[in-house]
Amino acid sequence: MSDKIIVKKAGSRKIVIADSAAAMDESTKGDVFVDGSHCGINVGEMTLNTGAGAMIGNDAGMGKNDAGIAGLKFLDKHGIPAAAVSAMSAKIGNGKSTYEQGKISVVNEAAKKLGITPGMSAREAADKLLESLSKSGK
Amino acid sequence: MTHEIHKVVRESGGLRIVIADSATSITKDNKNDIVVDGSHCGANIAPDYALPNGIRGMIGNDAGIGLENAGVASLKVLEEHGIPAAAVAAMSAEIGVGQSTYNEGIISTVNEVAKKMGVTVGMSAKEAADKMLEGIS
């Protein structure tokens, strides 16, 4: 099973790292979840169903029909900020690599509004998301 | 752990080929199965999901291969355990969708165990799964 590591806290919110998006659960509700998974449609659904506040994953090389980032658009519809790091910047399947080495390649509209941009480090993006979420108080 | 009802596409000699969107849905119920899934084949897949549940074969997505070939890192690990495994090209099938891996996937990477069973690069995932089923029977 994929372990979760808390790397930062702000108020009641946290930045949580895990190898797999499947580690998202009740304990990560409202948090910024940084994982090693692709951002396909099923990961978007996992994020929504567990109530994470924001998500950063791997773009998996985008792939067929941009399936590797299909979850980002899906989360946009629900107002959840989400972004992906380039598969060439971080090791897919390794959450720590996403957080420490990842360079953002794709952002959804909700994340863009919070200042997340392509080229930004995943760490900086996670910090910005945490800051925004902790201020929103939702 | 993700809950999924796996679709069984073939059964033969007590073994099955099953389809799952995510490798994280693999359980001990898959111990006689070749699992065809929509996940990447990164380093966490073998130790966290495939090996503890004793699956017999695996086909996933190569996730564009990526940094340090991370997208296919588990194939080698499964090989060391004698388990056939292969990945389909990210441009051939939609990652996260197991049915797409099975229906549309074209094999890009194969481990040595799968190679010995006749699985080759360029083969359809469907044919590769059949070869694995015959190979381990």
Image (cartoon, rainbow, N blue to C red):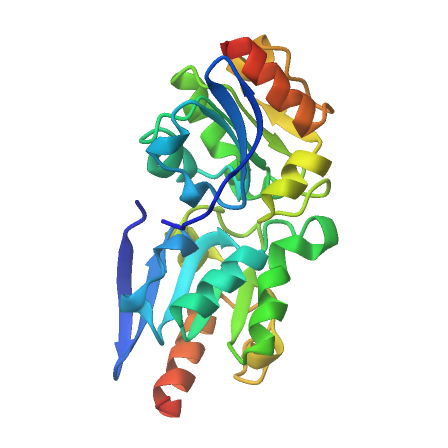
Image coords of residue B5 (percent x, y): 47, 44
A41 or A12: nearer the eye? A41
Q: Is residue A46 left or right of residue A120?
A: left
The residue at the point 34 percent across, 38 percent down is B48
The residue at the point 60 percent across, 73 percent down is A108
The residue at the point 41 percent across, 50 percent down is B3
Answer yes or no: is residue A45 visible: yes
Q: Is residue A12 left or right of residue B110?
A: left
Reply above or below: B29 against A37: above
A51 or A116: nearer the eye? A51
- The image quadrant that residue B56 belongs to is top left
A112 or B116: nearer the eye? B116
Image coords of residue A107 (percent x, y): 60, 70
Reply above or below: A51 against B40: below
Reply above or below: B20 against A12: above
Q: Is residue B28 left or right of residue A71?
A: left
Q: Is residue B59 left or right of residue A7?
A: right
The residue at the point 69 percent across, 49 percent down is A63
